[in-house]
Amino acid sequence: MAAYTTIDNPELHFQVKIWTGTGSSNALTLDGDEDMQPDYVMIKQRSSTQQWNGYDDLRGVQEYLGWNTSIVENTQSQGLTAFGSDGFTVGTDDMVNKSSSTYVAYCWKESATAGFDMVLYTGNGSARTISHSLSAKPDFFSVKSRTFAEQWECYHKLLGATKCLQFDDDSAEADILGRFNDTEPTTSVFTVGDADAVNKNTYTYITYLWRSVQGFSKMGSYKGNGNADGTFVYTGFRPAMVMVKRTDSAENWFVFDNKRDTFNPEDTFIRPNLNNADADESGGALDFLSNGFKIRNSGDSFNNSSGTYIFMAFAEQPFVNSNGVPANAR
């Protein structure tokens, strides 16, 4: 059997972490068999209403930007306080570590091999290209102003550079002037227009970019069928996380993962565009399979019969590793 992936251990590049808050500084260790020092961590309190909190080692520890809000970058001295060799430390703030509250974090390691890059730049007010280090065309990227209260502007290969979505909004795809200058990204650059959300003169921005990597990550799309025996989406791996957004109509973003639900069906979701707590989809939303995921719900959020959906998924285990060993089902 031919090798299917060069990333036999996805946990070296992406992991999901759940924990219960203590109210005191807490050094959290990731659960993988090998160490992974994350470069980007997005945290959400699961048990009550609270905004998302995202930290990366490029902007610096304690500087946060949450998916569900357009606010500028803020400093939280008791948020994520350190990136460790196999995890991260949270302080005492309720957003990350309230006593007895539950949390989830999505953790990425920056790596061209694993298809994730972070880029800082300063706006100049005119359409321009900006370099990235993926060595391949990004399939998904999101731009956020650090110094100006603007939405997250998201590119997805399905929509192309003429349209965009926003992490902090449930709106359908839209052609909004000045975002990506109607110019597709390349293997070395992405393009921003002259809009304040992506390129206001002298303001600073962060961009997170991903590309699909065989056996490890997949950014794609699927069509709904309106049936509880829903669409099967091939990823080439057993997912650790799946994010879904309908694009042709207003619907929330949804995230499912292998830590909050450890068996099928996946019915626990959290919404990146809202500050809401965990919620459950009655009857289940989808199954995580050895080579992808299957929709198990006929609702509009995931499976409208005429709906178009984008997804971003990361692996728990490749379908076939470099030694030809197949993955097990859950």
Image (cartoon, rainbow, N blue to C red):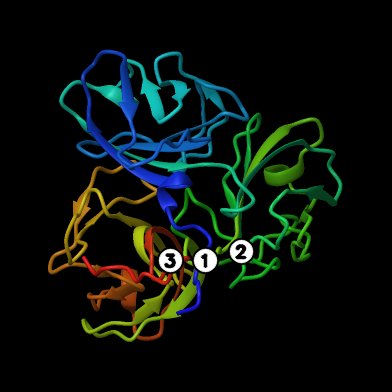
Tell me if label 1 and label 2 are in contact, CB under 8 Å.
yes
**Disc 1 element:** strand
Among numbered discs 3 and 1, the one appearing first in the sequence: 1
- Mark carried by residue 189: none
Give percent across and percent down for residue 164: 61, 61
Q: Nearer the viewer, mark 3 or mark 1?
A: 3
Residue type at numbered disc 3: Asn
Residue type at numbered disc 1: Met
* Residue that lies at the very extreme toward the left in this rendered image: 283
Give percent across and percent down for residue 25: 31, 14
Q: Which residue is mark 1?
A: 219
**Disc 2 element:** loop
Q: CA distance from mark 1 to mark 2?
A: 6 Å
Give percent across and percent down for residue 89: 38, 21
- Mark carried by residue 321: 3
Quarter occupied by the N terminus: bottom left
Residue found 38% across the figure and 45% down from its top: 15
